[in-house]
Image (cartoon, helix red, strand yellow):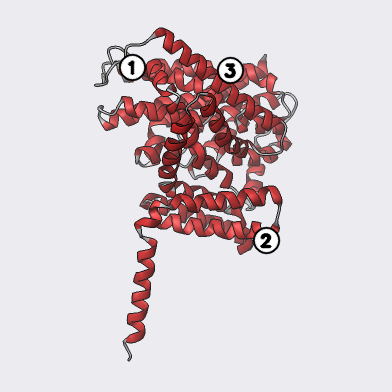
Amino acid sequence: MVDIFPHTFIAKAGFTLNILYNQTLLRNFYSIYAALFILFLIYFFSGIESLGVFVEYLAIGVLIISWIFSSRLFKMIGGLFVAAGVIFTLTSGGGIGTIISNSTSNLPLLMFFSLLPWIGTVVKVGGLDESITDMIQDRKNRVDKIYGSSVFTTYFLGIFLNISAIYIIQRVLNDLFKRAPVTLKNEFIIKSTLRAFALAVIWSPLEVIVGLTVDSTSVSYFTLLPWLLLTSVIVGVTEVLLTRHEFKGFTIDAPFDEINGSALRKSIIKMLILLVSFLSVVMFFNMNSDLDFVLTVALIIVPFSFVAAFVMKRFPIFLKTGWSTWQTHNNHMQNFSVLFLSLGIFSGGFNSSFVPELMQQVFGYVDSFLILILLLIMLVIYGLAMIGVHPVATLAILSEVLVPVMTAENALSIGIVMVVCGMGISAAAPYGVNATMTAQSMNINPYRITKMNMGFSLRMGLTGILIAIIALVI
């Protein structure tokens, strides 16, 4: 009789683990995320307080389950973020309820990633991915030539589709380089897509960092625009020339599809119509609603994709392919969930801690030297990005920290550096959205992306500071 309880306990524990690791759960993980997002949206638009509390606890449950199935690296990252967030929150007077509620702050971003496959499916079933391949490929398969066209194509799509462009272009390049050495393929995709995207969106009115900077500095977007465009062009041309040289002499084994000029022009026109339509819909809702940018795009992706597929007369194949792709994508989204849900706990705790006030004191010491202020802004944005604080969160902190040192004379220069550095680090930040998505698709450590792109991020940030000084002088 003495052994009954231990054996029963062990049997129950084993049964529980079997349930957790059951393949049925892994095949249906998408339904867990779908339930979380649907309940979150109902709460968001209804404001039912009891539902909001339930969503917060559900988010914690999803974090725990996702953590069990995540990779070792993201288990460690998630654990560190949660531990640091808990310490920050408790030492600043917050409680367990605050910690739990902070977990939902990144749900719109997680939902955005969940829905990305739908816009990618529209591009695929509409035959537009073949047109993208035609725009990128080189008859002799010279990697340096393909690099230039890949940067241009990513830049072009990034202006309209924002981060969705990275997902689309990386999928096309992955197929083009499928016979190339893995190290060459990864380096090419990381450098061509993440760098081009950072350059494309620094002047886009749809970029949340641009909007946040305009609000915090009170500098008109149209005043910032020429300086941001100048920075984008200078850094872009420099990077293409430098990096193409790195790939010179390399070729890949890939079939070359003869280009039908007429068909390509039609596809480009179709793509332009799709991109402009998407941009227009996003701008309309962004200007006529109080929703933040990421949530606006997330809510638009599915209905826009359905309408676009219907107009293209590809709806049945779109529905079948899209549903299958979305299920597969969400069944493997555990790393994303761990990162963004734990990051919400960390960011909430960080913002309520003593650190922002300490930063304000440091800026106060150098308020007479603009160059030091600009360098310090870059250091803060880049430094915090390395430990997982998103540039948007950092800029929100800086908007308060910089109030005592900001004047009518230096506001434009500060605004330029905030935008350029905020986007410049996106190509290298190990826990940033772009790098995380890329690392997940390539199954690599995100710090490899940091190693490859940190030089670019530093050059872009320093160029932004130089342009900001010129703007002050002129």
Instruction: Mark 1 or mark 2: name the one nearer the start of the chain.
Output: 2
Instruction: Give residue 248's quadrant in the image.
Output: top left
Instruction: Give residue 464's quadrant in the image.
Output: top right
Q: Is residue 211 visible?
A: yes
Instruction: Mark 3 or mark 2: name the one nearer the start of the chain.
Output: 2
Q: Which residue is mark 1?
A: 144
Task: Classify mark 3: helix, strand or loop.
Answer: helix
Nearer to the camera, 210 or 89: 210
> Which kind of residue does numbered mark 2 sit on?
Ser
Instruction: Mark 1 or mark 3: name the one nearer the start of the chain.
Output: 1
- Disc 3 packing (10 Å; few <14; some 14–19; many ≥20): some
Q: CA distance from mark 1 to mark 3?
A: 25 Å
Left or right position of 374 against 126: right
> Which kind of residue does numbered mark 1 sit on?
Asp
Residue ID at (48%, 18%): 236
Residue 128 on image: x %, y %: 44, 22
Q: Which residue is mark 3?
A: 229
What is the number of the mark on residue 50? 2
- Disc 1 packing (10 Å; few <14; some 14–19; many ≥20): many
| Residue 407 sits above or below residue 148 on the image | below
Left or right position of 463 against 130: right
Q: CA distance from mark 1 to mark 2?
A: 57 Å
Q: CA distance from mark 3 to mark 2?
A: 47 Å
Residue ID at (50%, 19%): 271
Q: How many marks?
A: 3
Left or right position of 71 against 119: left
